[in-house]
Image: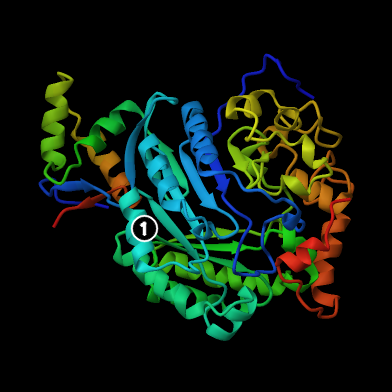
Amino acid sequence: MKTAGSKSPISPPRWLLAELTYSCPLQCPYCSNPPDYARHTGELSTEEWKRILTEARAMGAVQLGLSGGEPLTRKDLPELAAHARKLGYYSNLITSGYGMTESTIGQLKEAGLDHIQVSIQAPEQELSDFLAGTESFEHKKEVARLVKKHGYPMVLCVVIHRHNIEQMEGILEMAIELDADYLELANTQYYGWAHLNRPQLMPTREQFERAEAIARRYKEKLKGKMKIYYVIPDFYEDRPKACMNGWGTTFLTIAPDGAALPCHSARELPIPDEKFPNARHLSVREIWEESEIFNLFRQFDWMQEPCRSCGEKTKDYGGCRCQAYLLTGDMYATDPVCSKSPRRHLIDQAIEEAETLPEQPLIFRNSRNSRSFQKP
Amino acid sequence: MSFDPAAPLMFSPLHRLQWEEAQQKHVILYPEGMVELNASSAEILKLCDGKHSLNTITTELERKFGTEGLMNDIREFLEIALENGWIQITH
């Protein structure tokens, strides 16, 4: 493990994900927030966020995600967007659209927000509202139109899982109807609430392959008109993803209570919460360069076999630490997606479960459910 | 992608071209992405202002750097820029 004061050059953060709040009017069962989010109370103030934005920008962060929860529940959102613009960030608002009005969009545009990403759960009302746990479908579509009207690049995001994967064609047609500039088809990544609901969310291999073929066909057809990002579910790969482009190399997440995380799922790791450096008390530079947590999986010394002696370790950095932990119980293990992992069978088992496990009710993301979870 | 060498070109309103002090280079920013540019690509893109065309960008850069024969390289880069949506042909 590299420790504070190590001579190895540490590249500065490029991406700052500001999770402004855990409040959200929606209840998506694949939410990436930690299942026990309701235990983390006490949001950072406007002035604290401004300082964090300033410090991260000075180090070289340039992309800013304003996320949550639902960031629109923060009344200071336009003020933070204006601060970000002044600093030279490219700012991305990642929203459900719920609660967005034309006047808010105008305010944010004036503040200098660069882009709004609206998520829609499915291409038809009943399913979309069921998955969101809130009646929101028509309003979301209206927001998507307003985003376009106000001259923003329009990015539509749809999280893909077993309940909507058969509607891939409908999703793509909806994106065309809404005149999206970008469409992000994000296959569910099994962290947070999605991990809890995995047997109910994971598509079968056959469903996945059919959907991918449709997406590929539209990608070709819409070339030059709409950019389609198809985020693959890595369970079906035999090499893990280079998660976060490597721990502590590029991404910095600040959680609503100030906890600094090398990835937005890191709170799920078996690390006591008080060990995460907190931006309330520390500067971004101290967090990024000196904290034990950000140095924990930097470089290669922490690795076990087969990663340690593997020629591909500089490509995928051993995969995802959260996935390793959630599936093997060991956060230092090789990501079990890798076919070289001695525990690859855990992934194959999960894929098999998608075909065989009986339907269970989805666990929706809300504070009542959240309070029943506690990190081991 | 071939295009009229006299057609005016403009930088896309859906992207942003910006100097990054920390990286000491120009970058193109767009939703959740960034492209790092070398110095000559940045010089070309800065001239995509809705008035300059391939012809006039070439003349200007050849004069600025006191050289000749840049047309093909500039055309090649502009084709890539058009394909990626970084610039548009002004109509």
Residue at the bottom extreme of this rendering: A126
Q: Please identify the quarter of the rendering in which residue A252 is found.
A: top right
A185 or B63: nearer the viewer: A185
Using the image, determine if residue A144 lies above or below residue A236.
Answer: below
Please indicate whether residue B7 sits to the left or right of residue A218 in the image. left
Estimate the x, y position of residue A128 in percent, counting from the top left. Answer: 57, 78
Instruction: Tell me which residue sits at (80%, 36%) in the image.
Output: A307
In front here: B70 or B63?
A: B63
Q: Characterize the local packing of mark 1: few (<14), some (14-19) or many (20 or more) Cα atoms within 10 angstroms.
A: many
Position of residue A164 measured from the top left corner of the image (x, y, whole percent): 62, 76
The residue sitting at 51% across, 78% down in the picture is: A137
Q: Chain of mark 1?
A: A
In this figure, which residue is indicated by the disc labeled 1? Answer: A153
Q: Is residue A253 left or right of residue A347?
A: left
Q: Is residue A354 above or below residue A269?
A: below
Residue A274 at x, y percent in the picture: 78, 38
| Residue B31 appears in the figure | yes
Q: Is residue A110 above or below residue A165?
A: above
Q: How is the image coloured?
A: rainbow
Residue A106 lies in quadrant: bottom left
Tell me, yes or no, if residue A191 can be seen here.
Answer: no
Q: Residue at x 48, y 67 (%)?
A: A97
Q: Type of residue at label 1?
A: Pro
Q: Image point 62% across, 79% down: which residue?
A: A166
Task: Please determine whether, in this image, residue A215 is positioned above or below residue B70.
Answer: below
Total labels: the figure holds: 1
* Quarter of the image where the N terminus of chain A is located: top right
Q: Position of residue A36 (x, y in %)?
A: 77, 56
Secondary structure under tag 1 reads loop
